[in-house]
Image (spheres, rainbow, N blue to C red):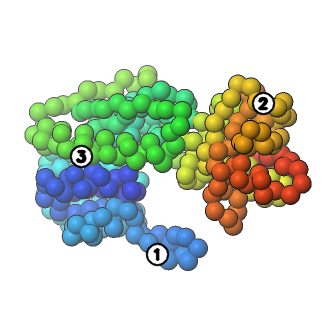
Amino acid sequence: MVFLGTPLAAVPSLRALAQTADVALVVTRPDRRRGRSGRMTPSAVKGAALELGLATACPTDRAELADALESVGPFQLGVVVAYGMLLTRSMLEQAESGFVNVHFSLLPRWRGAAPVAAAIRAGDAVTGVSLMRVTEGLDSGPVLAAATHPITESDTRGGLTERLSRLGADLLAANLAGAISGERAGTPQHEPDATYAPRLSADDARLDFTRPAQELARQVRAMSPRPGAFAWWGETRMRILDARWSAIAPTPLRVGELAAEGGRLWCGAGSGGMVLEVVHPPGRRAMPGADWARGVRGGLGRLSGVGPSQS
């Protein structure tokens, strides 16, 4: 087998595969500079592969990826979990039984790089994991198996992704033999139902308080913990890591206006009110919004989606 993956969410599937198969190579994205120290740090998948004693490759482009796959020689199956680079037809043809992908949505809904964030932000009640055969298209191959998982009003992107990663590992293990043998061709996806979740951008995390509180709360949870939704408090860029919404705020609030009521930090929106459960001021630790409000001298003021250099 050859495994391709990068983030922590791919590690459970790698571990599940390594328990039952001969993993000849683990392909992941190159080491990156992380944190304030700027030290080169391997991906979560590379760290797990080294712990398991598996060979690794970190290609920087498709040419190097093709070379890495060819270096293995003929192999039975390729498994992809959030790797971050599309495979060409010639790459796919190197595996005797093809490639399969563990994707964190119920395909064809939310194809693309950020399916968990998209499902939360859209207010979906249910998501899940799909095991599909990889084709040249973006997450468009036949689905071999799927498992559903509910989305609650308290789910963040980080917490939901963690649970889906475990569900995906179980789904892979249960269907690995069928994927290798080819006994299941898979169910073609219904193209008219396809929706897309592109890679997150900085603008996806910016909060616009003219929008309804319910939408804002979902956006906050979809961006948590990373990159973290944000707004401006004066000249300070404030990250909002958790939020809830209410149809009616305890005190009438203008758009973006802050108020401490009933031991909670409220913020006005286009309609309804939002409770800022967890905030992360720059240079400080993340904390309950109410704790931050108690430490503010003078009025709480308001939050804005427009920074000082943009106003």
Badge 1 amino acid: Met
- The residue that disc 2 covers is 250
Q: Is residue 230 left or right of residue 298?
A: left
Which type of secondary structure does the marked residue at label 1 adopt? strand
Residue 45 against residue 183 in the figure, above or below: below
Crowding at mark 2 (Cα within 10 Å: few <14, some 14-19, many 20+): some
Q: Which sits in the foreground, 253 or 33?
A: 253
- The residue that disc 1 covers is 40
The numbered disc on residue 99 is 3
- Which sits earlier in the primary sequence, circle 2 or circle 3? 3
Crowding at mark 1 (Cα within 10 Å: few <14, some 14-19, many 20+): few
The count of marks equals 3
Q: Picture coordinates of residue 152 (x, y %)?
A: 49, 32
Q: Is residue 287 left or right of residue 2?
A: right
Question: Distance between the Cα atoms at labels 1 and 3?
Answer: 30 Å
Question: Distance between the Cα atoms at labels 2 and 1?
Answer: 48 Å
- Which sits earlier in the primary sequence, circle 1 or circle 3? 1
Q: Picture coordinates of residue 33 (x, y %)?
A: 51, 72
Badge 2 amino acid: Pro
Badge 3 amino acid: Phe
Q: Quadrant of residue 170?
A: top left
Which residue is depicted at the point 34% across and 37% down? 129
Crowding at mark 3 (Cα within 10 Å: few <14, some 14-19, many 20+): many
Which residue is depicted at the point 39% across and 56% down? 8
Which residue is depicted at the point 77% across and 39% down? 261
Quadrant location of the N terminus in the rendered image: bottom left
